[in-house]
Amino acid sequence: MGARLLPLLIVLMAAVLLALGVPLAVSLAAAQQQRVVVDRIDDTARFAGLAQYVTDRPGPTGSRVDDKDERGETLRKELAKYYSVYGIRAGVFYRDDVPMANAPGNWYLPQRGEGRNAFNEALLGRRSHDPEQVWPWQRSRLVVASPVIRDGDVVAVVVTDSPTGQMRSKTLHGWLLVGAGEVAAMLLAVGAALRLTGWVLRPVRVLDATTHDIATGRLKSRVAAAGGPPELRRLARSFNEMADNVEEVLEQQRAFVADASHQLRNPLSALLLRIELLALELPEGNEEIASVRTEGKRLAEVLDDLLDLALAEHAEADLRLTDIGALAAERVAAWGPAAEAKGVRLVGNCPPTTAWADPVTLSSALDAVIDNAVKFTPEGERVDVEVAAGGESAMVVVTDGGPGLGDEELARVGDRFWRSPAHQNVKGSGLGLSISRALLEAGGGSISYGHHQPHGLKVTVEVPRAGTPTGRAARS
């Protein structure tokens, strides 16, 4: 979510900054040019004022300005000084393009282009229009023309032709400042977007982690509804209420199973005792009594397993650094006589390996797994128990030479009361592996099932080796 929200915020803020920066840059260039145009207008007005009083008569050199005309001489000096100081070409031209005065002396009115257009506009008795906008990458010149009016008639036109290098440099410098401001604002905006995204998504991440904790068995996990937007705080409070209700329902379920198992034990024990007494009155080997006795004992086993399962799902793990190899070797030795009595070879390869585990829990889980392996392995086959360490976990792998299970059956192994249809006649309640899974998950461990080649079942019991164990053990 953060990977989508953050780019969206950055794109929106970049669009806002561009929407503000581009008009600002255009306005800056226009203002810079307008200042130059206003200065040229003032200059042309001043030169027009000087040219207005120049006597209009032929001189000995053939020009219309008498060389002895003091006003004409003053105009020429002013234009020459203006050009030498500012580098701006300027001239006063009669209606027939003949110069009254110009600087430099070899500059004349162009026959086409902006200069000619401005001259023609000024001949109509008004100042030329403002030049088109000049951008920093253009090398255009600014031309401004003003009419010289005498007795209500336009007798000449003042034309200034300005270079734009300095103006374009100032515009570019202003643009660089605007760009630097945009970059700084964008960096601040990105920082603000990061903070905003973190502020908005932090409660979501906490909620996601807490949901995962509850899904893996840590039902006491809750969300601290203290940060983030009000909507997410309300969501956190609602989530906590839901988790409280779920935990309460599960607790009631466990309590009911435990209480029902415990309460049924005494009547069932009394019933089995009466069956045994009744059997004494009947002929030995009575099939009905034997069947009732068998079903009664099976019901007692189911009640015991239900009570164990209820306690396992509610138990806290007592994790310790345990030698998994020694513990597995002990269980192999304990189940050796049972395997030998059935004609099954039980072989253990258990090198020393330390890991975090509850010794009692792991022993119970291994008992259930080895019991199943020996139970379903035919005579003459073998059951292997191997201990290995891999990365951050230690594994006890139990493989047997039994018939194994299909893919669909593997997906259901460990479900409560589930037993393979092919083994319904084998003694058991179908709760042993469920109890083992609950006990292992309480300590951050796991149990998984797979195929063993060429035939049989492969059961892997895994417990953490390093770091903080996960699972319900974190509550301990």
Image (cartoon, rainbow, N blue to C red):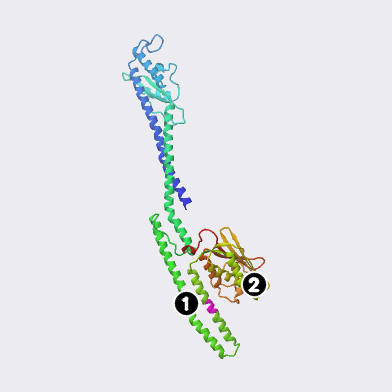
- Identified by mark 2, the residue type is Thr
Q: Residues within 10 Å of mark 2 (few under 14, many from 20)?
A: many
Decide which of 311, 455 is in the foreground and name it.
311
Query: Residue 377, labelled with which disc?
Result: 2
Of helix, strand and loop, which one carries label 1? helix
Q: Residue at x 39, y 61 (%)?
A: 237
Read off the magenta span. 298-302
Q: Residues within 10 Å of mark 1 (few under 14, many from 20)?
A: some
Q: Is residue 197 above or below residue 343?
A: above
**Residue 291, image x and y in percent?**
58, 83
Query: Residue 260, labelled with which disc?
Result: 1
Quick check: 440 left or right of 59? right
Of helix, strand and loop, which one carries label 2? loop
Q: Residue at x 43, y 56 (%)?
A: 203
**Residue 290, image x and y in percent?**
58, 85
Q: Residue at x 43, y 47 (%)?
A: 193
Decide which of 337, 55 is in the foreground and name it.
337
Q: Is residue 354 above or below residue 256?
A: above
- Identified by mark 1, the residue type is Ala
Task: Tell how many labels.
Answer: 2
- Residue 289 is at least partly visible in this image: yes
Which of the 4 quarters of the picture holds residue 396? bottom right
**Residue 316, image x and y in percent?**
48, 67
- Residue 15 is at least partly visible in this image: no
Which of the 4 quarters of the picture holds residue 177? top left
Magenta stretch, main secondary structure, is: helix
**Is residue 333 found inside the magenta-colored segment of the image?**
no
Decide which of 473, 33 is in the foreground and name it.
473
The numbered mark, 1 or 2, whose residue comes first in the sequence reads 1
